[in-house]
Amino acid sequence: MKGNYIERYHAYSNYLLAISTIINNEYDSLEEIVDLVISENDNQQVEFSNSKLTRISQLLRNSWLTEILLNQTKDNEDLLQFSNPWSMVHSYYAIYSMLVAYFEACRNREIKAHQSLLKSIGSEIQYSNNMFPVPWNYYCLEDPRLGIVEIENDSNIIRAELGNALISPRKNPLQHFALFLKTTRQRQVDKKKDDWKRQNRKKRASKNKTDEIVNSLRPTTFFDAIYRLRTRTNYEDIDSFMFANVKKSDSIRFIEAICNIVETTLLIFETLIALKVGRNSFESILREIQNSPITNVAQDSILNRSSIITSRI
C-alpha cells in the first residue's frame, strides 16, 4: 500500500512539475506573458456600472486572498507534506474566482457552478484563435480509450504517447501535460458512465453507451485537470500525501510548481480583465489592496504582477 501512495503522489507531482516546466521554458518573464496576451486580444475598454465594478473587484480579491494563503504555505517547510494537498484546493479556488471575474468582466456572464465554468472556459479555448498562450490553450477532444491521443491548440498538435506518469517530466514536459489531459478526460468519461449507471440502475454501460458518452464530451483543458486534482485531494486521495513520506525537497518542488502555475494563470486573466475595465478602474481596485493590511504579503505577487500590467495597457 505504501508503494501506491508514493506512486500516486509522484504522478500528481510530475503533472504539476511538467506544466511549470513548460511555462518556464516558454517564457523568460512575466512581462513576456503580459505582452503576448495583449498582442492577441482586443484592447477595447468597456464602461461598467459601479455595482458591476464592485462585483468584479470582490471576485478578484477572493482570488488574490486565496493565492496569498497558498503562497504562505511555502514558508513552513516542515508542514509541506501535510499542507500540500490543500495547496491544490487553494490553487483551484484562486483560479476559479479569477475565471468567474473574467466572465463577469469580459463576457458579461455570471457563472458560478464549477462544471458550467469549466465548460465555458473550454469553449473559449477551443474557439479563441490563440487568445490564450501555451500551455493554457491546449485541449483534448479525442477518445481517451485510445492508446495514443492528440491534444491540440490553434497552431499545434501533440500526440500523447507517454503512458507512465512516473517518468521524470524534465526531458519532455509536453508529453506529461498531454497524458494529464488524456487521463483527466478518461476520468470524465468514467464519471459520466457511473452517473448513467446510477440513474438507470444498471451494473454496466454498453460499448454503444460509452461511445455516446465519449462523443458528447466537451473539450478537456488545463482547467479540468486542475479541477480533477482539487477533487481528488479534497474528497478521494488525501492519503497519498499523508502517508507517502516523500523527501522535503520533493515537497518544496511540488509547492513551487503549484505557485508558479497559479501566478502565471492569474496573470493571464488579470491582464484580460484590466484591458476590459481600463487602467483607471483596475488601479482603483488595486488601491484597495494597497491600503489594506495585506499589502506587504501581496507585494511580491499581486502588486508586482499588477504593476507589470498597468505599465503596458
Image (spheres, rainbow, N blue to C red):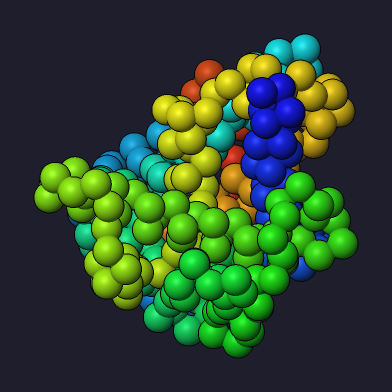
The residue drawn where x is 79% and y is 24% is: 246
Report the label total.
0
Q: Is residue 53 visible?
A: no
The residue drawn where x is 69% and y is 43% is: 11
Is 299 placed left or right of 270 in the picture? right
Q: Residue furthest top?
A: 78
**Image: 21 above or below 34:** above
* Quadrant location, the N terminus: top right
**Image: 120 above or below 116:** below
Choose top left, top right, bottom left or bottom right for residue 239: top right
Q: Residue 43 at what x, y percent from top left? A: 45, 75
Is 284 placed left or right of 296 in the picture? left
The residue drawn where x is 48% and y is 84% is: 129
**Image: 101 above or below 46:** above
**Most foreground residue, 213 or 159:** 213
**Most foreground residue, 193 or 110:** 193
Q: Residue 33 at what x, y percent from top left? A: 67, 65
The residue drawn where x is 86% and y is 28% is: 249
Q: Residue 178 at what x, y percent from top left? A: 63, 65
Q: Is residue 225 visible?
A: yes
